[in-house]
Image (spheres, rainbow, N blue to C red):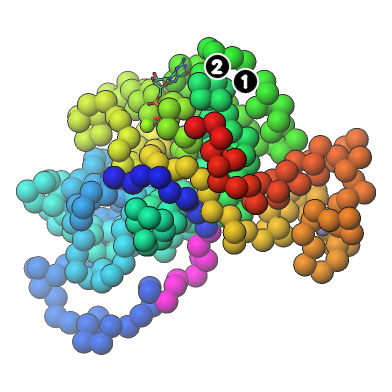
Amino acid sequence: MVGIGEWRVSRRATHVDEDDVRVRPGRSKSRPRSKDRPTFEEARPGVVVTVDRGRFTVDTGEREEFAVKARDLGRKGIVVGDRVGVVGEAPGSLDHPVRIVTRDPRTSELRRTADDSDPVERVIVANANQLAIVTAIANPDPSIGLIDRSLVAAMDAGIAPIIIVTKIDLLKPDVIRDMYAPLDVPVFPVHKGAPTPELLDTLTGHDTVLIGHSGVGKSTLVNALVLLAERTTGSVNLTTGKGRHTSTSVRAFRNPGGGHIIDTPGIRSFGLAHVDPQNLVLAFPDLAELTVDCPRSCSHDEPECALTPFVDSPNLGSRVASLHRLLRSRALPEDQVNSTR
Ligand SMILES: Nc1nc2c(ncn2[C@@H]2O[C@H](COP(=O)(O)OP(=O)(O)O)[C@@H](O)[C@H]2O)c(=O)[nH]1
Ligand SMILES: [Mg+2]
Ligand SMILES: [Zn+2]
């Protein structure tokens, strides 16, 4: 099981990486076709929704199928969210799984950084294009440090962030709403796991990763979403056939209107050492415009910065202040980030 760890999200270059173009000697494309070696053109497209010790579940549109990796993939890793091609008789079952023969280039990667429990940095989720930061308004108290750091990670990776505030039966969500209004980050309050039409609308068509401390209500929300999906589609898929979802591993759930919700256990913090302030400023187009007058390699949080005179501006002041807070959150010590645990 994935335990405590630091996470990193990054945007992948859209061009194919070295791994994708490497030519393996002795495996030319002109090898003879046989029944056992279908061409990749015959592969059916799908999205990986679970990964469990070399076994995969792939959503191929109509259903979820069991799959294994084909040798053709070489050393390419397959994670939740990967767009893959499968071959073999449908539907792939536990006894007769289909085989994953291709993996599309990734648009983004969420990684778990190395730590004591696992010395290797691993990609956990691929191709997410929305990051939902889930925080309870109370029990446990929100950690602004963690929310800010999660925002920095998302903005740096070019992934759209949203904030979901749970447990609003315990306290009004206004503090969070006010805090993030200057950043233009949408805030969605959720009452006892019941998603609002606005939240459903925002989730539809996106591959959204849910992150947040354990106990904030991620699984409760996912269960409500899955129930809703069953009611609208009248179908029971592999996911719910196994009963109530409790998160012990990363899992993608299909949104019948398009896209997926991806629950991730064990995220405690984000590693941000690599984040360039300039990349973060790009998430604020109005401020980015002003930074053309900055000194070279400006930290955007220094007296000479072209943004400094705008700290007291009635229009931009709160945005500049929020940007400064995000920039400083990169350096927060871990125990401060996790102070509400
Ligand atoms: N009062 C209240 N409790 C909630 C709400 N949402 C979830 N919970 C409770 O919070 C606890 C943790 O929820 P869970 O979904 O397992 O959190 P996760 O660890 O983030 O997946 C459970 O006891 C839930 O019943 C809510 O909106 N209000
Ligand atoms: Mg959970
Ligand atoms: Zn600057």
As drawn, is 52 to the left or to the right of 247?
left
Q: Which residue is drawn at 38% across and 73% down?
A: 20
User: Residue 170, percent across and down?
Assistant: 54, 13
118 or 101, nearer to the observer: 118
User: Residue 212, percent across and down?
Assistant: 48, 36
Q: Main secondary structure of the magenta part?
A: loop
Q: In which quarter of the image is the N terminus?
A: top left
User: Residue 195, percent across and down?
Assistant: 48, 22
Element under label 2? loop
The residue identified by callout 2 is: 168
**Magenta stretch bounds:** 11-18
* Displayed-image quarter of ligand 3: bottom right
Q: Can residue 123 be seen in this view?
A: no
The answer to the question of whether label 2 and label 1 lie on touching residues, with beta carbons closer than 8 A, is yes
Asked if 103 appears above or below 328 in the picture, the reply is below
As drawn, is 148 to the left or to the right of 195?
right
Q: Residue at x 32, y 83 (%)?
A: 23
Asked if 242 appears above or below 283 in the picture, the reply is above
Element under label 1? loop
Q: Which residue is drawn at 53% across and 12% down?
A: 169
Q: Is mark 2 within 8 Å of ligand 1?
A: yes
Amino acid type, callout 1: Pro
Amino acid type, callout 2: Ile
112 or 77, nearer to the observer: 112
Counting residues from the N terminus, which is met first, the one under dot 2 or under dot 1?
2
The residues tagged by marks 2 and 1 sit, at their Cα atoms, a distance apart of 6 Å
Residue 252 within the segment the image draws in magenta: no
Q: Residue at x 54, y 54 (%)?
A: 271
User: Residue 97, percent across and down?
Assistant: 13, 52
| Circle on res. 173 | 1
